[in-house]
Image: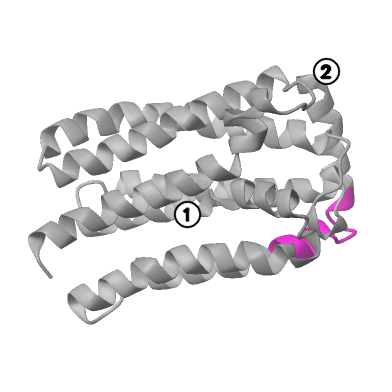
C-alpha cells in the first residue's frame, strides 16, 4: 500500500465519522432553524457547540499528520486534551439532563432508563480518548484509540437517524450495525496494509459492538431504574 494511501485512511475515516454525526444531528441541531422544534436547553446547546468544535479539531489533527506536521499536531494535541476534559464533563451533565427529558426512546425506553446508554457512550469515549492521550508517543496505538473514541461517539447521531425514519423497533440492530460498519473499515485497512488486524481495532471494535446489547439489557433492568430516576431528578435541576 502506498504512502499516499496510508496517509489518506485516517483523514478519510475521520471525515466519514464527522459527516455521519453531522447528518445525524442535521435536523435537531445544525439545520433546526428550518424545522418547528421545541427550544433547546442551554446545557444541550453548550454540549452541541463543544462537540462541534471537537469535530473540527479531529479533522484538523488528522490533516496535520497527513501533511507531516507532527510538531503542530502535538502542540494542538495538548490543548485538545484539556478541551476534551471539559467536553466529557459537559457530556456527563448532558446525560443527566437528558434523563429528565419527557420522551420515549428507541426500544420503548423512558429517558431515565435510556440514561444508561448515555453513561456508557460518554464512558467509552472518555476511556478510549484517555488511552489515546496516554499512548500519544506510540503512533500506532494513539491513532487507533483516537479513531475508536470517535466511533464510540456515533451512538447519539445514530439514535437521531433511527427516530427520523421511525425504525425504533430495529434500534438495537441499527446501533450495532453502524459501529460494526465503521470498525470493519478499520479492520479491512489493517488487513490490506499488514495482512493482520491490529488488536486495538479488533478487540476495541468488538467491545463497542457488544456494549449495545448490554446497554439495552441494563437500561431495562430493575437494578438501573432507581439510578436512572435519581439521574432524572439531578438532571431536572440542570435544565429547568
Q: Is residue 151 visible?
A: yes
Residue 173 coordinates in the image, percent (x, y): 68, 69
Helix, strand or loop at mark 2: loop
Q: How is the image coloured?
A: one colour
Work out whether 204 lies above or below 10. below
Task: Please indicate whether residue 65 sits to the left or right of residue 182 in the image.
Answer: left
Secondary structure beneath label 1: helix
Where on the picture, by quarter, is residue 216?
bottom right
When the figure is inspected, residue 239 is found, relative to residue 131, above or below; the finding is above
Query: Which residue matches tag 2?
Result: 240
Question: What label does residue 44 carry, if any?
Answer: none
Instruction: State the residue in front, 129 or 159.
Output: 159
Q: Position of residue 135 (x, y in %)?
A: 28, 50
Q: Residue furthest bottom?
A: 195
Identify the residue at image location x=43%, y=66%: 183
Local crowd size for mark 1, using a 10 Å CA cut-off: few (<14), some (14–19), many (≥20) = many
Bin the neighbour count of mark 2 within 10 Å (Cα to Cα): few under 14, some 14-19, many 20 and up: few
Q: In what quadrant of the picture does the C terminus appear?
A: top right
- In the rendered image, residue 224 lying in the magenta stretch gets the answer yes
The x, y position of residue 162, in whole percent, is 70, 54
Q: Earlier in the sequence, mark 1 or mark 2?
A: 1
Highlighted range, magenta: 214-225
Whether 44 is drawn above or below 214: the answer is: above
Q: How far from the left and from the top, in percent, is residue 150? A: 45, 49
Q: Is residue 61 left or right of residue 101?
A: left
Numbered badge on residue 151: 1
**Residue in view at x 80 percent, y 25 percent:** 38
Q: Is residue 174 magenta?
A: no
Amino acid at each position: 500500500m502506498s504512502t499516499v494511501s496510508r496517509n489518506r485512511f485516517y483523514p478519510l475515516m475521520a471525515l466519514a465519522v464527522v459527516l455521519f454525526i453531522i447528518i445525524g444531528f442535521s435536523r435537531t441541531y445544525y439545520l433546526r432553524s428550518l424545522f418547528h422544534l421545541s427550544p433547546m436547553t442551554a446545557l444541550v446547546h453548550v454540549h452541541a457547540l463543544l462537540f462541534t468544535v471537537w469535530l473540527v479539531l479531529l479533522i484538523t489533527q488528522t490533516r496535520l499528520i497527513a501533511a507531516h506536521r507532527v510538531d503542530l499536531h502535538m502542540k494542538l494535541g495538548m490543548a485538545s486534551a484539556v478541551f476534551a476534559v471539559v467536553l466529557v464533563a459537559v457530556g456527563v451533565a448532558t446525560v443527566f439532563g437528558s434523563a429528565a427529558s419527557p420522551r420515549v426512546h428507541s426500544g420503548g425506553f423512558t429517558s431515565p432508563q435510556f440514561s444508561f446508554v448515555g453513561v456508557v457512550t460518554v464512558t467509552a469515549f472518555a476511556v478510549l480518548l484517555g488511552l489515546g492521550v496516554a499512548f500519544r508517543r506510540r503512533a500506532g496505538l494513539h491513532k487507533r484509540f483516537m479513531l475508536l473514541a470517535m466511533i464510540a461517539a456515533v451512538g447519539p447521531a445514530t439514535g437521531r437517524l433511527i427516530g427520523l425514519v421511525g425504525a425504533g423497533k430495529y434500534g438495537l440492530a441499527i446501533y450495532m450495525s453502524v459501529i460494526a460498519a465503521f470498525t470493519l473499515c478499520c479492520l479491512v485497512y489493517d488487513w490490506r496494509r499488514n495482512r493482520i488486524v491490529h488488536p486495538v481495532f479488533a478487540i476495541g471494535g468488538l467491545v463497542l459492538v457488544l456494549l449495545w446489547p448490554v446497554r439495552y439489557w441494563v437500561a431495562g433492568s430493575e437494578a438501573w431504574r432507581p439510578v436512572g430516576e435519581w439521574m432524572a431528578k439531578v438532571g431536572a435541576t440542570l435544565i429547568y
